[in-house]
Amino acid sequence: MLAASRDDTVDVDAVSSAVRSIAIEDDEARESRDADGGENDDGDDDDDEQTNADAGAKKKKKKKKKKKSGAGGGVKSTSVQYPGGKQTAPPSVPARELYPSGTYPVGEILPHHEHNLWRETDAEKREIERIEENSYNEARQCAEVHRQVRRYISEWVKPGMKYIDVCETLEDSVRKLIEERGLEAGVAFPTGCSKNHVAAHWTPNGGSESVIDKDDVIKFDFGVQVKGRIIDCAFTKTFNDMYDPLLKAVNEATETGIKSAGIDVRLCDIGEAIQEVMESHTVEIHGKEYQVKCCSNLNGHSIDPYRIHAGKSVPIVRGGVQTKMEEGEYYAIETFGSTGRGYVIEDGECSHYMKNYDVGHVPLRLPTAKRLLGVIDRNFGTLAFCKRYLDRIGQERYGMALKNLCDNGIIQPYPPLCDIKGSYVAQYEHTILLKPSSGVEVLTRGDDY
């Protein structure tokens, strides 16, 4: 888990409308050509009139509506005009080239809660924001990369594709758009594509043959980082309208968490608000009705540089701690709604790992473990990684060394987190910034969610 911008964003609705108009004109022209049958003119006026009449009748036939391809939506990735040009499909043009000014879109700004409105005019708070603007802009760059990549993935992914191919396409796109530079910029953690009853922490290991099914409920959870500033954002993808009410419930719960967040807000109050909205929904799946339940032992979290879980947890049920959010903090606000028991356990083959942030020197006897730790330090530091990432940088037969690092408490394994089999879990997540003066910035807001 591991918004629309202001000056720098394009009017995506206008672009979308124009693209649709062009597509409709092209379709009509194509239908007209098909109806005419490409026949040569034989000089017979009656035949021509009859042919035109037939063509007109055919054109009047109602077109079949395309079946919905899944949740996520949004403007086609190649139709959006950025200040520096258009993005490719799959995405490959660095965000820096699409925003030549070096200034990235500001996320959605939500005003402070009433008790903090004084901050909006306070000169000292405004100056703090001015000093931090470069850091904010780096976070916005990561958020823009996330928006562009997820837009493409959401419209491109289809049943029958291998999960590993989808993940590697997504991650390669992130690397290109952020211009990967070792630990300075790149993928922030492995792409989660947990499906159905698996809520989080699943990504395919090397050689996986797992294929997307038309009835899968997939949680795409991926991150981007620059100088350790992590953007963590997730959405749920389906290919069947039956799941739409579940997705709606979870998205509404996440939005409630975002609106409830703010400086001096108690974390427990956010959890209570989320649960009230989430569990007000019922859904019907395969003819059976379920109350949507919060996955009570999953949480949002604060984010620090190179530290995805920075110490504060944002509950999604009532009864959490009374710790308060503070000025300048970044949070991942995420919710998980389930048709199962609403409680997850570790189950299945592990793929996610991360070096413990506070681990000191631990003497290692196994030479291969020492070497692997050096590789992890140089390539990932305290960012999460997976077995595919070790494969990618040429590591082989590292299983025993990795287990030794886990046994010694240096590396923490994160196995898949699962509700009961046969249930369905959906997830939505945004990264927010509690700005000292102007309010709460939803950094990852997009036209899709």
Image (cartoon, grey):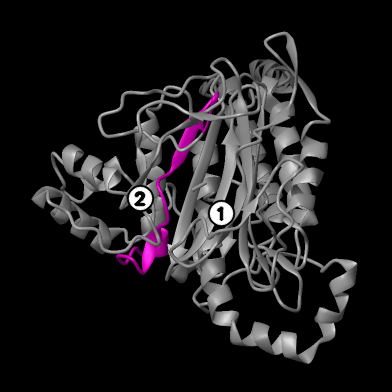
Lateral position of residue 325 relative to residue 347, left or right: right
Q: Position of residue 435 (x, y in %)?
A: 69, 73
Q: How many marks?
A: 2
232 vs 35: above or below: below
Task: Please provide the residue range marked out in magenta.
Answer: 176-199
Q: Type of residue at label 1? A: Arg
Please say whether residue 180 is one of the residues in the magenta stretch: yes
Tell me the element at label 2: helix
180 vs 385: above or below: below
Please tell me in which quadrant of the rendered image residue 337 appears. top right
Tell me the element at label 1: helix
* Residue at 12% in and 48% down: 366
211 vs 436: above or below: above
Q: Position of residue 387 (x, y in %)?
A: 28, 41
Q: Which residue is mark 1?
A: 147
* Residue at 43% in and 64% down: 306
Q: Nearer the viewer, residue 426 or 45?
A: 426
Q: Which mark is residue 350?
A: none
Q: Rounded to the nearest whole Å, what is the CA distance between mark 2 and mark 1?
A: 15 Å
Q: Position of residue 293 (x, y in %)?
A: 72, 28
* Residue at 86% in and 80% down: 118
Q: Type of residue at label 2? A: Asp
Please say whether residue 355 is one of the residues in the magenta stretch: no
* Residue 72 shows in the view: no
* Residue at 53% in and 60% down: 310
